[in-house]
Image (spheres, grey):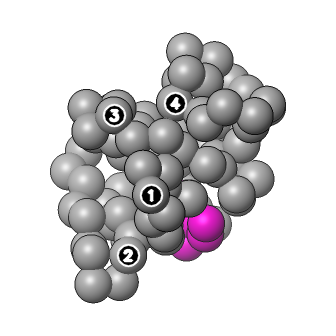
Amino acid sequence: MEIKDNTFLRQFEAIIDEQFISLEYSFQERKIFLTKLNAPTGITDDKIFLFFESILNKLREQKMKVVPTTPKVVNFFKKYPNYKEMLPPGIVI
């Protein structure tokens, strides 16, 4: 899956099953806040989670801390605890 970082719109973008999906973000210091998921209703949670996984792997390489503010991203962190080290201190999910 190819993830595009659209810095102008401040969102990560991808095409899944010929449908556009995006995850909006905002930066503050060395933290990225994942703020809003824009996904069509036909995309399954598994495919959305693969989208999140690709994004988080990129952010892990950049040593970024992640603050999830949308419920789907919070659910991802609950389902995959190996990404919890990316949360900043004080954030417990």
- Residue pointed to by mark 3: 63
Magenta residues (range): 34-39
Cβ atoms under marks 4 and 2 closer than 8 Å? no
Residue 17 in picture, x, y percent from top left: 36, 57
Q: Image point 60% across, 24% down: which residue?
A: 84
Disc 4 residue type? Answer: Met
Mark 4 or 2: in front is 4
The stretch drawn in magenta includes residue 70: no
What amino acid type should be assigned to the residue bearing mark 3?
A: Lys
Which of disc 2 and disc 4 is earlier in sequence? Answer: 2
How far separated are the C-alphas under marks 4 and 1?
Answer: 15 Å
Q: Is residue 74 above or below residue 3?
A: above
Q: CA distance from mark 2 to mark 3?
A: 19 Å
Q: Are marks 2 and 3 in contact (CB under 8 Å)?
A: no
Real-space Cα distance between discs 3 and 1? 12 Å
Left or right relative to 64: residue 89: right
Tag 1 residue: 29
Disc 2 target residue:
10
- Residue 23: where, in percent of width, then height? 48, 64
Q: Amino acid at mark 1?
A: Glu
